[in-house]
Image: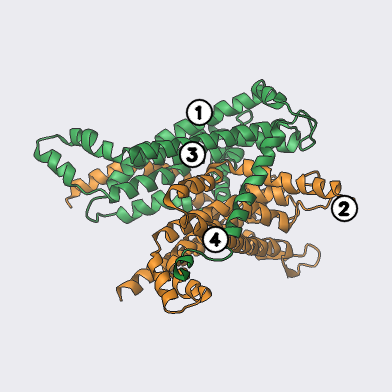
Chain colours: A green, B orange
């Protein structure tokens, strides 16, 4: 009886600290969401329940433009970086060592080793000059920058998956006279698809999350959601900020839930 | 491997390699070059070699009598960045380790739910989470309203724009980064080892120190790197929580390229920050590869 009551997985105090951790993580977000339903204009000053600021956000052209910019950026950067990362992962796995393999690996991980602010400053110096010389100041610069820092995030899960896959199925396909491309399309790609999907999602969220890079590189009128929110935080603190923040929070809940459902199906 | 095969593999990796070389490695090289140039009059640089940028990272020259003194402002920010990042890492261990333990010791069906709760903040926009924690402590924020309402204080306490605010903000936003790798390590832990230890009359504390902690150490180290590195390079959270009063290195760099108009100093500070991050990463690689060697021996 005494033996059964002794639980080896129990450590006194862990439950208390764990509960504290969840409370700390969720209280600020819960309060932010609660205040987004405030009818008062001044943030944090409760005047009654209302959806007013969600309505105001939806009719706010600057917010909508920022949302569209963010979406264009995130979709383009994550698609391009996932394609490039998949190619690079296929090149650097399941092979004997070849000249420059280590170099490729270091280059692909390099953006992760440099703080974002340093990368942003570095790009500002160069892109500022290009903007002056060419007169072009479209979204292209932001797309290039986002693609760059998204590549390692897409590369890591895809590479990890490939390292766990042996070549026996591909060899079997080749034995049955399947061509290189056919084998890739019908054997390798389906096996790799879940990893490509998680690499893509990671890249998408990382691009959507970025404030520093976009804030430094954007031309006038090129706000993304985070840079718009940052600007509003400085200019006018209205409850609309909390409504927009809550929408972004909702988006990440949907993404997390979506990916959980997707991985469940896979199992 | 044949030459043609090597070439094919390089060709496959080329787009990613080119993008990163052009938009990350090359610009970083330019920053290194700029750190050895002379500041221009309105920002930018003049192409005259100078080590003043690097000199100003740690020292300042008195403009009246040309004496050299240690730059208290820059060193203060450098020290603050390192110290606050270390404390952030420590606090996230204190909360993250028990949380990971708690989740890993739930029945399997419940674990997914708790991990889901950790993953949501992890995937939520950093700025949104910083705004949320700011609401708690700003002068019209939740804490001050509660304390005022209860009559405990009569004037709002100024908590923002301080080391405390930066620390709170960074701990809040980076906490999930600690829980994930520690959880992965504890989930792999064989609880029969703890049972064996207790059977041999080891106390809980002894078992924790000599059996559990050594085995989940890789997870804790990985989590510490995941928290320490972004803390050191943090820009958004200290900018909102610390403002101009409690700057970190990232904000100081930004200042040199903006109002400060000293691009070479900003460039030298950028390289300093990058080197600090690389040192942390090298330390991490040493630690993890060292463990592998021991396992072989």
Inter-mark Cα distance, 3 to 2: 41 Å
How packed mark 1 is, by other alpha carbons closer than 10 Å (few <14, some 14-19, many 20 or more), is some
Q: Are marks 4 and 3 on the same chain?
A: no
Pointer 4 and pointer 3: residues touching (CB < 8 Å)?
Answer: no
Q: Which mark is residue B98?
A: 4
SS assignment at label 2: loop
Q: What is the chain identity of the residue bearing mark 4? A: B
Q: Picture coordinates of residue A143 (x, y %)? A: 49, 34
Q: Which mark is residue A256?
A: 3
Nearest to the eye among marks 3 and 1: give it.
Answer: 3
Question: Counting residues from the N terminus, which is met first, the one under dot 4 or under dot 2?
Answer: 4
Picture mark count: 4
Q: Which mark is residue B37?
A: none
Question: Counting residues from the N terminus, which is met first, the one under dot 3 or under dot 1?
Answer: 1
Q: Residue at x 9, y 37 (%)?
A: A176
Is residue B120 rendered to the left or right of residue A232?
Answer: left
Q: Which residue is mark 1?
A: A72
């Amino acid at each position: 009886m005494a033996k059964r009551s002794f639980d080896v997985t129990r450590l006194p105090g862990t439950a208390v600290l764990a509960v504290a951790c969840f409370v700390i993580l969720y209280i600020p977000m819960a309060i932010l969401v609660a205040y987004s339903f405030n009818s008062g204009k001044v943030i944090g000053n409760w005047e009654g329940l209302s959806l007013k600021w969600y309505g105001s956000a939806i009719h706010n052209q600057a917010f909508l433009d920022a949302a569209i910019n963010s979406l264009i950026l995130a979709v383009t950067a994550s698609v391009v970086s996932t394609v490039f990362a998949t190619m690079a992962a296929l090149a650097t796995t399941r092979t004997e060592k070849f000249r420059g393999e280590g170099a490729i690996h270091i280059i692909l991980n390099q953006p992760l080793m440099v703080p974002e602010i340093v990368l942003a400053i570095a790009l500002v110096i160069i892109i500022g000059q290009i903007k002056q010389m060419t007169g072009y100041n479209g979204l292209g610069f932001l797309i290039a920058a986002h693609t760059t820092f998204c590549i390692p995030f897409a590369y890591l899960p895809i590479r990890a998956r490939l390292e766990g896959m042996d070549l026996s199925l591909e060899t079997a396909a080749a034995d049955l006279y399947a061509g290189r491309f056919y084998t890739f399309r019908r054997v390798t790609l389906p096996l790799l698809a879940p990893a490509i999907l998680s690499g893509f999602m990671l890249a998408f969220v990382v691009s959507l999350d970025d404030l520093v890079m976009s804030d430094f590189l954007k031309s006038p009128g090129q706000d993304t959601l985070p840079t718009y929110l940052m600007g509003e935080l400085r200019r006018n603190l209205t409850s609309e900020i909390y409504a927009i923040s809550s929408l972004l929070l909702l988006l990440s809940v949907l993404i997390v839930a979506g990916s959980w459902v997707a991985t469940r199906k896979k199992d | 491997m044949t030459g043609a095969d090597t070439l094919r593999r390089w060709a496959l990796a080329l787009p990613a390699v080119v993008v990163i070389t052009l938009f990350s490695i090359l610009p970083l090289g330019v920053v290194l070059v700029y750190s050895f140039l002379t500041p221009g009059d309105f920002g930018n640089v003049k192409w005259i070699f100078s080590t003043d940028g690097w000199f100003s990272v740690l020292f300042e020259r008195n403009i009246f009598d040309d004496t050299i003194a240690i730059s208290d402002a820059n060193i203060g920010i450098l020290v603050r960045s390192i110290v606050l990042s270390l404390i952030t890492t420590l606090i996230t261990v204190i909360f993250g380790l028990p949380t990971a333990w708690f989740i890993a010791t739930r029945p399997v069906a419940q674990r997914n739910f708790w991990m889901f709760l950790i993953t949501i903040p992890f995937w939520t926009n950093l700025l949104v989470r910083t705004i949320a924690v700011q609401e708690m402590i700003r002068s019209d924020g939740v804490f001050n309203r509660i304390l005022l309402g209860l009559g405990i204080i009569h004037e709002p306490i100024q908590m923002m724009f301080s080391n405390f605010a930066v620390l709170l903000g960074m701990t809040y936003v980076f906490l999930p980064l600690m829980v994930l790798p520690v959880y992965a390590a504890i989930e792999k832990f064989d609880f029969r080892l703890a049972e064996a230890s207790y059977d041999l009359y080891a106390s809980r504390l002894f078992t924790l120190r000599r059996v559990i902690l050594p085995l989940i150490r890789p997870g804790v180290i990985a989590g510490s790197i995941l928290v320490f590195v972004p803390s050191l390079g943090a820009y958004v959270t200290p900018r909102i929580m610390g403002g101009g009063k409690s700057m970190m290195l990232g904000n100081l760099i930004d200042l040199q390229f903006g109002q400060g108009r000293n691009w070479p100093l900003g460039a030298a500070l950028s390289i300093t920050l990058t080197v600090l991050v690389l040192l942390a990463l090298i330390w991490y690689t040493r630690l993890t590869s060292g463990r592998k060697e021991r396992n072989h021996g």
